[in-house]
Image (cartoon, rainbow, N blue to C red):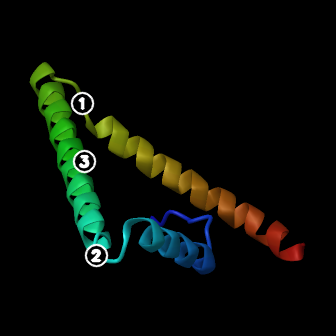
Amino acid sequence: MSIPLFISGGEIAFVIFIVIMVFGADKVPDIARGLGKGMRTLKNATEDIKSEITKSADKQGINTDIAKDMKKEIDDAKKNIEEITGSVKRKF
């Protein structure tokens, strides 16, 4: 699943230009490295929390397959809606 970005390539270039002007070219790699480490830490923490919740649910006897089944049902419903509205969208 892709997340649409609401900024264009020109806007990204402008932001990069401003970052270089404010922090200097020698600090940009350090800033990017720090952001990468922060994102990796956040991802690891999220995975840990998810696994703890799953373990706790399994220990309590809670069925966690319901969420997977609901996701499948939602995906099927989206596909059906797109099939129905596809012909309407093409006419406009």
Tag 2, which secondary structure?
A: loop
Instruction: State the image coordinates of residue 36 (x, y, percent, origin top left).
Output: 25, 62
Nearest the viewer among 8 and 80 is: 8
Q: Which quadrant holds residue 34?
A: bottom left
Upstream in sequence: badge 3 or badge 1: 3
Task: Report the residue marked by disc 3.
Answer: 42
Of label 3 and label 2, which has the lower sequence position? 2
Q: Position of residue 11 (x, y in %)?
A: 61, 73
What residue lies at 37% left-to-right and 72% top-to-bottom? 24
Mark 2 touching mark 1, by CB under 8 A?
Answer: no
Tell me the amino acid under the disc marked 2. Answer: Asp
Residue 31: x percent and y percent?
29, 63
Q: Nearer the viewer, mark 2 or mark 1?
A: 2
With 54 as the anchor, is 26 left or right in this view?
right
Classify mark 1: helix, strand or loop.
loop
Quadrant of the rendering where the N terminus is positioned: bottom left
**Which type of secondary structure does the marked residue at label 3 adopt?**
helix
Task: Report the residue at 26% width, 73% height from top.
Answer: 29
Indicate the amino acid at tag 3: Leu
Q: Which comes before the other along the chain, label 2 or label 1?
A: 2
Between the C-alphas of marks 3 and 1, the distance is 27 Å
Give the camera-side residue of 74 and 48. Answer: 48
Which of pointers 3 and 1 indicates the residue nearer the eye? Answer: 3
Residue highlighted by disc 1: 63
Which residue position is annotated with label 2? Answer: 26
